[in-house]
Amino acid sequence: MARRTITVHQVRALLSGVQGQGVDTVPLLQRAQIPPLLLGDERARVTPAQFVRLFRELYELTGDEFLGLSTAPSRPGTFAMMCHASLASRDLGAAIERGVTFYGLFPGGPDLSLTVEGGEAVLVVRNDFASEEQRFLAECVVIIWHRLCSWLIGRRIPLTWASFASPPPPYKDEFPQLFGCPVHFGAARTGAGFAAQYLAAPLVRDEGELAQMLRRAPFELLSRREYATTVTEQVRRALVRALGDSPRLPALGEIAARLAVSPATLRRRLAVESTSYKELKDTVRRDAAIAGLAEGAEPIAELAARLGFSEDTAFHRAFRRWTGTTPGAYRLATAATTATAHETRSQQS
């Protein structure tokens, strides 16, 4: 199943910590098989596989779970020990409190608080993250804690809101899909809210499941969308499955019937989540195209046909609109970067 691609603005934000330390990021990008020239294109996107390779390269380089994005590093294993400390809690509320207390022991780490306000649980990041790289770290902290809480109880916790004290970043349009709720910028606090009833939910994970999750953390949590849940994600998954079976994507009415709602209700629910059926069809095609070009050898004409384009020229126009470049140029740049990465590894071994 094709996973959602990631905007180049988030790649830049991920690199901003080491860039501030004077690190040459070109070799990092090449080892992650991301063409460095993509960083100069405002519309460029990368696959989740490319992004996670870059994350791992940064982790290995910095030896810091915050990847140089905070004023103080977080030693490898800190997040894992926090999870182990929280796992034996009686319920989710106690697990969050234990995690908050744990991170309070470390200078420069997330300064978190959990309160209940009128039937709503409010998790706040109290750090004064003023710089651009620190603001990106704050976004990651909110996402990871939300996904971790959902993972601990085995079901996704719907957020009622998310807010950030910082101005909106260039990739602000990604946020409704990341959080599945209204997102506010320039707010009085950075954090998120959800129904307080979830705090009483028992934890359903054991040490074995935790060990498996930690082998892929934190990207596993940053990208996790398995607790099926927002209407947007249900529709997107249905579209991705349909694209795997046929180049013809189903009409809105067909998807509405599968979800047992009327087309008007489906439109309304998608609008509440700040998207539309047309937009979702476009992003599913876009993400499948980028993944196909970056990580496969499928001829471009066949890829265009598989994605439902009647002719190559229509696919070229759409891809340029999505990314600012042509399918051929994107594939050539990715192939050249991959070859450089393989050659570098061969020389080092």
Image (cartoon, rainbow, N blue to C red):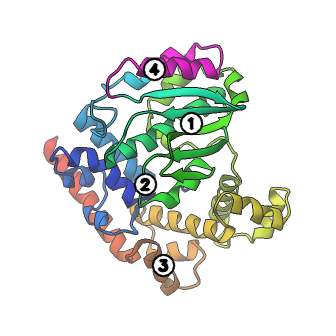
Label 2 or label 3, whichever lies nearer to me, is 2
Mark 2 or mark 3, which has the lower sequence index? 2
Mark 2 or mark 1, which has the lower sequence index? 1
Seen from the viewer's position, the closer of residues 220 and 298 is 220
Image coordinates for residue 343, horizontal then vertical, percent: 19, 53
| In this view, 257 is above or below 57 | below
Q: Which residue is mark 3?
A: 301
State the mark number for residue 82: 4
| Residues shaded magenta | 84-108
* Residue type at tag 1: His
- Give residue 245's quadrant in the image: bottom right
Within 10 Å of disc 4 (Cα), the crowding (few <14, some 14-19, many 20+) is some
Label 2 or label 4, whichever lies nearer to me, is 2
Q: Quadrant of the C terminus?
A: top left
Tell me what residue is drawn at x 41 percent, y 62 percent.
45
* Residue type at tag 4: Met
Mark 4 or mark 1, which has the lower sequence index? 4
Label 2 or label 1, whichever lies nearer to me, is 2
Secondary element under disc 3, as helix, strand or loop, is helix
Q: CA distance from mark 2 to mark 4?
A: 30 Å
Image coordinates for residue 257, horizontal then vertical, percent: 84, 62
| In this view, 260 is above or below 283 | above
Tell me what residue is drawn at x 24 percent, y 35 percent.
62
Q: Would residue 115 be found to the left or right of residue 59 on screen?
A: right
* Residue type at tag 3: Ala
Secondary element under disc 1, as helix, strand or loop, is helix
Q: Which residue is mark 2?
A: 167
Label 4 or label 3, whichever lies nearer to me, is 4
